[in-house]
Image (cartoon, helix red, strand yellow):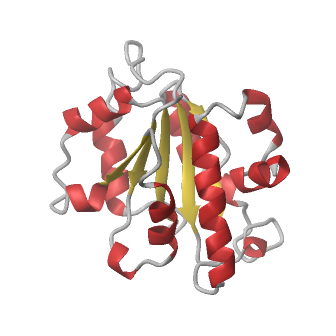
Amino acid sequence: MKKILIIFAHPAIQKSIINKTLIDAVKDLKGVTVNDLYENYPDFFIDVEKEQRLLLEHDVIIWHHPFYWYNAPALFKEWMDLVLQHGFAYGRTGRALEGKWVMSAISTGGQQEVYSKTGSNRFTVNEFLAPFDRSVTLCRMIYLPPFVTYGSHTITKEKLKQQAKDYAEVITSLRDGKFNAQDFLKADNMNHLIANYA
């Protein structure tokens, strides 16, 4: 069984419906650790050694956050800048995280159709996530297809309930080794991968 670490970054979780629902669906799963950055570091003073230890203790890392301005909330960027240090995560001698799996779990305000070549955002979610993909690759880790919840402003209760169920299924499937490298190559996102497994 793989150990899952969810790096959760939401600056206003008390106002969240989407991300709170998703986190609630997975926080008590066996083998899953939720590391809430805004709860742990309200002053932005990140305990780098503690965060690095957490990364070393887990096999699969989930970067879970709302997709703010086609990116991540500020504290998550600070976490990346400080924790993924040269000599630890990357560089000639930085091999501590080599081979670990990383997946982005994000929520967007826009519907799926706006994230396309012909949509108003002009790029796909995967194209917007390219900096995360490259950061993971630089750290010799493996970047998985993302889990995406679209249309957070208009999502129905039924759709959100299904998203939470699918997210829990993704997390348990990663934990239990149900996916292999070939599965990831065939999927644009984890949502489709889970749908195909069902």
Spot occupied by residue 44 in the image (x, y as percentages of width and height):
20, 57
Image point (21%, 55%), residue name: 40
Specify whether residue 132 is in view: yes
Position in image of residue 134 (x %, y %): 56, 38
Q: Say above or below: 109 vs 181.
A: below
Image location of residue 71, percent across then percent down: 50, 61
Classify residue 25 as left or right of residue 76. right
Quadrant housing residue 57: top left
Question: Which quadrant would residue 128 be assigned to in this image?
Answer: bottom right
Q: Residue placed farthest to the top in the image?
A: 93
Please report the residue visible at 40 percent of the width from the left and 49 percent of the height from the top: 7
Q: Is residue 42 left or right of residue 116?
A: left
Who's the residue at 63% across and 62% down the image?
Answer: 165
In the image, taking residue 162 as reference, residue 138 lies left or right, namely: left
Q: In this rendering, does residue 128 appear at all?
A: no
Q: Position of residue 83 (x, y in %)?
A: 30, 37
Q: Is residue 177 above or below residue 27?
A: above
Q: Report how many numbered discs are placed on residues in the image.
A: 0
Who is closer to the viewer here, 24 or 37? 24
Question: Is 156 left or right of 193, judged from the image as shown?
Answer: left
Q: Is residue 83 above or below residue 189?
A: above
Q: Residue at x 48, y 29 (%)?
A: 59
